[in-house]
Image: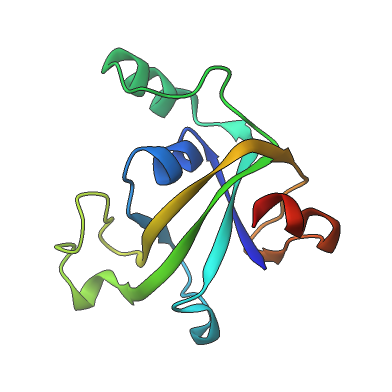
Amino acid sequence: MLALSLYQPWASAVILLGKDVENRRWAPPARVIGQRIAIHAGRRVDQAALADARAADVPLPEPLPTGALVGTVRLAEAHHATSCGCSCSTWADPGAHHWLLADPRPLTHPVACRGFQRLWTVPTDLIGGIR
């Protein structure tokens, strides 16, 4: 299974709060479209986004998991912003590749794991903990 690392609180927003687009500078490989991928909460926290979420009373987990797999999503579609005019989601960023995420499934407990840049393969010994 492949995984994608996101800063917090964005990883939790994807899994728990309906963030249905991940904006990237690169398109995913075509073979991944339609497949489930794991969402990894990286060790880095976007402090400005976290402060905004807390100010808006967004229900985030406490403590916010970092350095762990937190759930899975299906990569339903991907396209560049120029093909949708950013009308595909309120989360869509102009100038980015939009990865449309569907069917989020949170893990019962975060699974500690080192993350990597771009798409990466979940270690085989952790697959059972996320399926």
Q: Position of residue 1 (x, y in %)?
A: 67, 68
Residue 51, by quadrant, is top left
Q: Measured along the vertical axis of the image, is residue 92 above or below residue 26?
A: above
The residue at 56%/64% (across/down) is 37
Residue at 34% over, 65% down: 98
Taking 131 as reference, is 47 left or right? left
Residue shown at 28%/55% (left/top)? 93
x, y percentage for residue 65? Answer: 61, 29
Q: Which x, y percent locates residue 12?
A: 47, 37
Relative to residue 66, is residue 28 drawn left or right?
left
Q: Using the image as rendered, state which of residue 113 and residue 106 is in the foreground.
A: 106
Residue extending furthest toward the bottom: 31
State the image coordinates of residue 76 (x, y, percent, origin top left).
Answer: 37, 72
Which residue is found at the position 40% from the left and 38% from the top?
A: 16
Q: Quadrant of the C terminus?
A: bottom right
Report which quarter residue 29 is drawn in.
Answer: bottom right
Total numbered circles:
0
Query: Does residue 131 lie above or below 54 as drawn?
Result: below
List the single residue furthest toward the right: 125
